[in-house]
Amino acid sequence: MSSGQELLQSFKVSASTDQPSLSIRVGVGEGILRPVPTSPERLNGDDVRVLTEWRNRYVRSFLTEFQATEERTAKWLTEVVGPDPTRILFMLDDANGRTIGYLGLAFIDWDACTGEADAIVRGVSGTPGLMTNALLTLLGWAHRELGLTVGLNVRVRSDNPRAVDFYSRLAIETRRVPLREIAEPGMKRWIEDESLTASSAELIYLTFRPQLYLPQK
């Protein structure tokens, strides 16, 4: 196991509601990124509540669309995020301790030294630029501390114009893949299908500009 893998695991294990956790400072007193607890005995009820609320509010930003419940969110944290050694989720708290959003890393390829920014949602308004600073802080931490030095990427649906505009300021588009809509009981899924000649949405792949999250020499 690499030092980056060990550090990621240490952050996840430290996450707790009743004792200090390892965290990442954003700016000079602007806020902190604290790991979301994912073990069943340590789940933070407030985190589960806002994750559920905000997931439903921005449901059309995701590749799976469904009505989230707190029970379903808790199961996702404990059975998907927690055991996955390539994924971590953080809550962003501002200087006053108010949770304003969440963001994380996923699909880390430890051998290739790459990863993706994932599940980036601002739930409430806060200090202007704080979400951007938090994302860049997370990317810099992933590069320096986790060893993801080859590339950090993000994917976004083309029918989410605000998100597309946000990421286009921070990253370079590398490709687009048509999305096919699949209706299932209680859920809508969007899957990549390069055979489509026309579709209502595409999945845009972007690579973050390293000069934005790394110290300038």
Image (cartoon, rainbow, N blue to C red):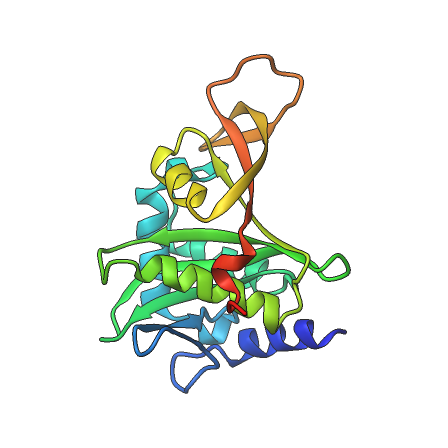
Residue furthest to the front in view is: 217
Residue furthest to the top in view is: 197
Tell me the quadrant of the picture where the C terminus can be found. Answer: bottom right
Q: Is residue 26 above or below residue 80?
A: below
Residue 198 left/right relative to 57? right
Q: Nearer the viewer, residue 57 or 162?
A: 162
Q: Is residue 12 visible?
A: yes
Q: Nearer the viewer, residue 128 or 158?
A: 128
Q: Is residue 108 visible?
A: no
Residue drawn at the location 41% of the way across and 29% of the way down? 159
In the rendering, at what x and y percent does residue 51 appear? 37, 56
Residue drawn at the location 45% of the way across and 61% of the way down? 136
Tell me the quadrant of the picture where the N terminus can be found. Answer: bottom right
In the rendering, at what x and y percent does residue 78 appear? 53, 63
Q: Is residue 208 above or below residue 41?
A: above
In the rendering, at what x and y percent does residue 38 appear? 51, 68
In the rendering, at what x and y percent does residue 72 appear? 45, 52
Residue drawn at the location 41% of the way across and 45% of the way down? 169
Q: Is residue 82 above or below residue 207?
A: below
Residue 28 left/right relative to 178? left
Number of residue marks = 0
Residue 11 left/right relative to 132? right
Residue drawn at the location 49% of the way across and 65% of the way down? 138
